[in-house]
Amino acid sequence: MVAFDVDGVLADSIHGFVRLALRETGADPAELGRFDDYADPFTPWPSRFRPRVQELFQRAYFSGEHGVYGDADVVPGALEGVWALHDAGIAGGYVTRRPDTLSAITLDWLLRHGFPELPVHHAPKGVGKAAQVRALGARVMVEDAPVEARALAEDGLTVLLRHEAYNASFEAPGVERCDGWPIIARRALALAGA
């Protein structure tokens, strides 16, 4: 069975947040540096904008404000990939780091965009995702965040890392980099023996 992270794997909330912050700060996109470190989303912003961007980040990601979660675009190929794994009988469900207070927004987004109706588990802050992944009967997790991928792999799960610029320099045993959803789906099917 395979489990799926939501943000950065299915929902493009990360780039949606950048669009929000550009609108709210009036920053010129040409002023931004490269976002090549998942753990540091603020350094790409010129210092004069960082306090406002940090405030927006807290309100968007922890309170669900500004529509960053609810209005996120679907990551290209994610819908088709999840359905291919669902149809093969190996899609276990979704495991997200979003606060459980945002469960209604999360479920609404998944269903509105046509994802299979599967269990959604919210990993509490400070607790690894491995227990939630295993609770879904999954041994494989599709993830994009390096810190999550490392912890899952160290806990004995196989991680398929969806390639992004912000995780491009990350490597760890048990983590397989996949450049796009067609590769993720093929690799997950192969791992499941389907």
Image (cartoon, rainbow, N blue to C red):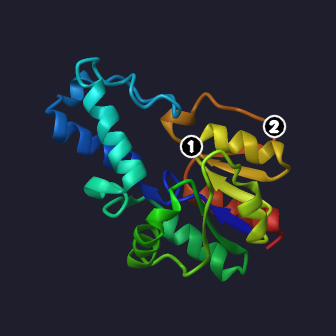
Q: Earlier in the sequence, mark 2 or mark 1?
A: 1
User: Picture coordinates of residue 148 (x, y %)?
Assistant: 66, 44
Q: Is residue 60 left or right of residue 98?
A: left
Helix, strand, or loop for circle 2? loop
* Image position, residue 145 (x, y; %): 59, 42
The furthest residue to the top: 47
Q: What residue did someone put label 2 on?
A: 173
Which of the pair 43/9 is nearer the observer?
A: 43
Q: Is residue 46 visible to the viewer in this orientation of the structure?
A: yes
Q: Amino acid at mark 1?
A: His
Q: What is the crowding at mark 1: few (fewer than 14 residues within 10 Å), some, or many (at least 20)?
A: many
Picture residue at 56% right of the left edge, 43% below the top: 163
Left or right of residue 156, residue 103 in this image: left
How far apart are the two marked residues, 2 and 1, measured between alpha carbons?
Answer: 16 Å
The residue beneath circle 1 is 163
User: What amino acid is found at the position of numbered circle 2 in the picture?
Assistant: Pro
Residues 159 and 49: in front is 49
Give how far across and how far down residue 140 sits, in percent. 75, 59
Residue located 82% across and 42% down the image = 154
Local SS, label 1: loop
Residue in the picture at 29% in, 27% down? 51
Q: Are marks 2 and 1 in contact (CB under 8 Å)?
A: no
Q: Dividing the picture into quarters, in which one does residue 193 lie?
A: bottom right
Q: Is residue 92 above or below residue 180?
A: below
Screen quadrant of the N terminus: bottom right
Q: Nearer the viewer, mark 2 or mark 1?
A: 2
